[in-house]
């Protein structure tokens, strides 16, 4: 059985604000409070490390085999070390979560989000709508293993 959690729609996040997650009591009981809270805390930390460009925080939430996979305009896989090197030049001006859905089964979680983001990456505008799927693995703690990001309306990533 797959547990599904709708964390709400149109929950806008502004840079520097606290994460807002809405959960229901039945779902919390189904996957266990500690597991759920730990996952939600790690998800919030991952988002915060991007917003704050915090490498130390990023290293604490990224799986050793983490990779960012982007698909528009072409498939590109950015491994963990390259993503960490890019982080100081990934400046998020605004971040609004329009949809968010979380599925958890055992030690695997998949978070789907539609994000409206205004950002500058390596000096190039990277603003627009994004469909993002994060795959989380529970080992010693929850770690994000993959982020699949599809730009719906944003310009292509600049060459690295």
Image (tube, helix red, strand yellow):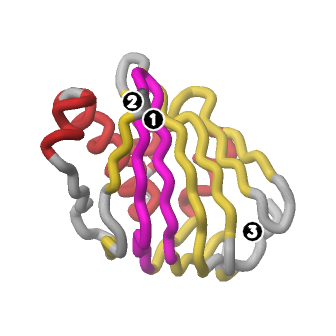
- Give residue 16's position: percent from left, percent from top: 28, 69
Mark carried by residue 142: 2
- Give residue 36's position: percent from left, percent from top: 26, 35
Classify 10 Å Cα crowding around label 2: few (below 14), some (14-19), many (20 and above): many
Q: Quadrant of the C terminus?
A: bottom right
Q: Is residue 15 above or below residue 77?
A: below
The residue drawn where x is 51% and y is 67% is 114
- Asked which secondary structure carries label 1, the reply is strand
- Give residue 97's position: percent from left, percent from top: 41, 69
- Give residue 98's position: percent from left, percent from top: 42, 72
Q: Overall secondary structure of the magenta stretch?
A: strand
Mark carried by residue 4: none
Mark carried by residue 157: 3
- CA separation, marks 1 and 3? 27 Å
The residue drawn where x is 52% and y is 30% is 63
Report how many numbered discs are placed on residues in the image.
3
- Asked which secondary structure carries label 2, the reply is strand
Q: Name the image quarter holding residue 121.
A: bottom right
Sequence-first disc among 2 and 1: 1
Q: Name the image quarter holding residue 81.
A: top right
Q: Name the image quarter holding residue 142.
A: top left
Q: Which residues are magenta?
A: 94-116
Q: Quadrant of the N terminus?
A: top left
Eye-nearest disc, 2 or 3:
2
Q: Are marks 2 and 1 in contact (CB under 8 Å)?
A: yes
Mark carried by residue 109: 1
The residue drawn where x is 75% and y is 68% is 157
- CA separation, marks 2 and 3? 28 Å
């Amino acid at each position: 059985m797959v547990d599904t959690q709708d964390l709400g729609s149109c929950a806008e996040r502004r840079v520097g604000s606290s994460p807002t997650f809405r959960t229901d009591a039945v779902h919390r009981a189904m996957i266990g409070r500690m597991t759920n809270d730990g996952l939600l805390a790690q998800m919030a930390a991952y988002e915060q490390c991007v917003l704050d460009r915090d490498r130390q925080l990023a290293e604490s939430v990224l799986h050793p085999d983490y990779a960012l996979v982007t698909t528009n305009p072409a498939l590109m896989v950015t491994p963990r070390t390259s993503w960490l090197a890019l982080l100081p030049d990934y400046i998020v001006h605004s971040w609004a979560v329009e949809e968010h859905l979380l599925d958890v089964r055992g030690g695997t979680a998949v978070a789907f989000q539609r994000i409206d983001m205004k950002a500058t990456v390596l000096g190039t505008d990277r603003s627009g709508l994004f469909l993002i799927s994060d795959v989380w693995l529970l080992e010693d703690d929850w770690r994000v293993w993959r982020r699949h990001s599809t730009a719906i309306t944003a310009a292509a990533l600049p060459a690295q």
